[in-house]
């Protein structure tokens, strides 16, 4: 029997607790992180990290479009995705050529009729002592890592503005976005720009339901950094990474789903999520 002096909040709680039906954990998590019915374009998606993200976003329900300048690598990536039973297509693109980016958008819309998210994963690197940095090589790195990213954001956001549900941008930065690392001057400066660009896009389009975030990975062995990983550098990386190991590409997927999923990421924009084994929180 209820007592007259029972606090109202307790009564409410008892009342609601009888009506409330707990959803099972799997459907709750699916609702939070699902990309069901969505289309995600991954530029640089044929590469190591882009490929792992494609597998993750596809398994979360998205139709993934692998977009990359390397057509052979696109085909190989698509073969790797096949056993996962996900919806996937590929399209070649050169992110340094705006016409090519526009064709990618047109082709994506032709294949799927919509684009909900764009993941910018294309990137190049070169390791050179500062006094030997060739201005042409500097421009080439910036053309892919920052200018190309800016142009793909422009082209895809223009299309997302027609979608009443908006869209999401995920740009791949680096631990170099936060701090310089020796011998990769152009790369580091371009990646610092990635975070700044992403924040600017986030504030510009927040009211239009377009969110923009970046993931800043630590060290994940891949083709583009194999050339600069000599023994001394590997030792420095391990000493500077509290977890004392490289990341594996699939360890980026959870962060990507958090930032891309409409429900899980609904109030997240302009953020940079470091997935780096603690590298950026460690000084010595
Ligand atoms: N691997 C790491 O440790 C690491 C760490 C931090 C950040 N990142 C960043 O993550 C992203 C992916 O890196 P990754 O390790 O998977 O490298 P990767 O070399 O395996 O993949 C990069 C992909 O970008 C594509 N690409 C290059 N130039 C292009 C262009 N002009 N147009 C279209 N596609 C182009 C390449 O063909 C390649 O498939 C890059 O932006 C990189 O800077 C990587």
Image: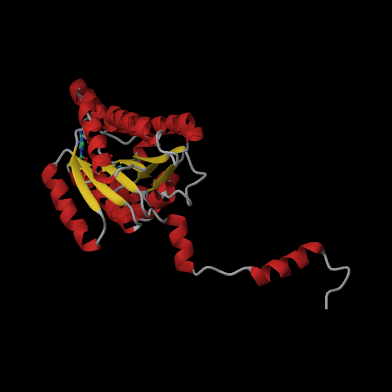
Q: Residue 10 location in percent, x, y?
A: 77, 66
Q: Residue at x 36, y 43 (%)?
A: 117
**Residue extending furthest toward the top:** 135
Q: Residue 210 location in percent, x, y?
A: 44, 37
Please tell me in which quarter of the rendered image ligand 1 is found. Answer: top left
Q: Residue 219 location in percent, x, y?
A: 30, 47
Q: Residue at x 29, y 35 (%)?
A: 182
In the image: residue 284, left or right of residue 99: right
Q: Nearer the viewer, residue 5 or 245?
A: 5
Q: Residue at x 19, y 33 (%)?
A: 94
In the image: residue 259, left or right of residue 191: right
Quadrant, the N terminus: bottom right
**Residue extending furthest toward the left:** 72
**Residue extending furthest toward the right:** 4
Would residue 167 be seen by someone viewing this image from the given angle? yes
Would residue 245 be seen by someone viewing this image from the given angle? no
In the image: residue 226, left or right of residue 268: left
Q: Nearer the viewer, residue 171 or 177?
A: 171
In the image: residue 189, left or right of residue 200: left
Q: Nearer the viewer, residue 200 or 22?
A: 22
Q: How is the image coloured?
A: secondary structure
């Amino acid at each position: 029997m209820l007592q007259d002096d029972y606090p109202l909040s307790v009564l409410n709680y008892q009342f609601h607790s009888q009506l409330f039906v707990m959803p099972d954990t799997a459907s709750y998590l699916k609702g939070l992180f699902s990309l069901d019915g969505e289309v995600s374009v991954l530029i640089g998606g044929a590469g190591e990290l882009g490929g792992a993200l494609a597998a993750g976003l596809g398994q979360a329900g998205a139709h993934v479009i692998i977009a990359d300048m390397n057509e052979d690598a696109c085909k190989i990536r698509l073969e790797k995705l096949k056993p996962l039973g996900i919806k996937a297509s590929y399209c070649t693109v050169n992110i340094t050529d705006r016409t090519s980016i526009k064709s990618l958008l047109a082709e994506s819309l032709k294949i799927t009729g919509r684009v909900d998210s764009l993941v910018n994963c294309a990137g190049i690197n070169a390791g050179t002592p500062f006094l030997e940095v060739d201005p042409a090589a500097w421009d080439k790195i910036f053309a892919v890592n920052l200018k190309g990213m800016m142009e793909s954001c422009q082209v895809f956001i223009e299309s997302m503005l027609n979608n009443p549900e908006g869209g999401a941008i995920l740009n791949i930065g680096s631990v170099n976005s936060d701090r310089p690392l020796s011998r990769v001057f152009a790369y580091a400066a371009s990646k610092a720009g990635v975070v700044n660009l992403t924040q600017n896009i986030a504030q510009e389009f927040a009211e239009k339901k377009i969110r923009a975030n970046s993931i800043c990975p630590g060290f994940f062995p891949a083709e583009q950094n194999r050339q600069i990983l000599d023994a001394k550098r590997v030792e420095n990386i391990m000493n500077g990474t509290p977890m004392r190991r490289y990341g594996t590409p699939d360890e980026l997927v959870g962060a990507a789903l958090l930032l891309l999923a409409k429900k899980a990421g609904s109030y997240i924009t302009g953020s940079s999520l470091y997935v780096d084994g603690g590298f950026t929180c460690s000084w010595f």
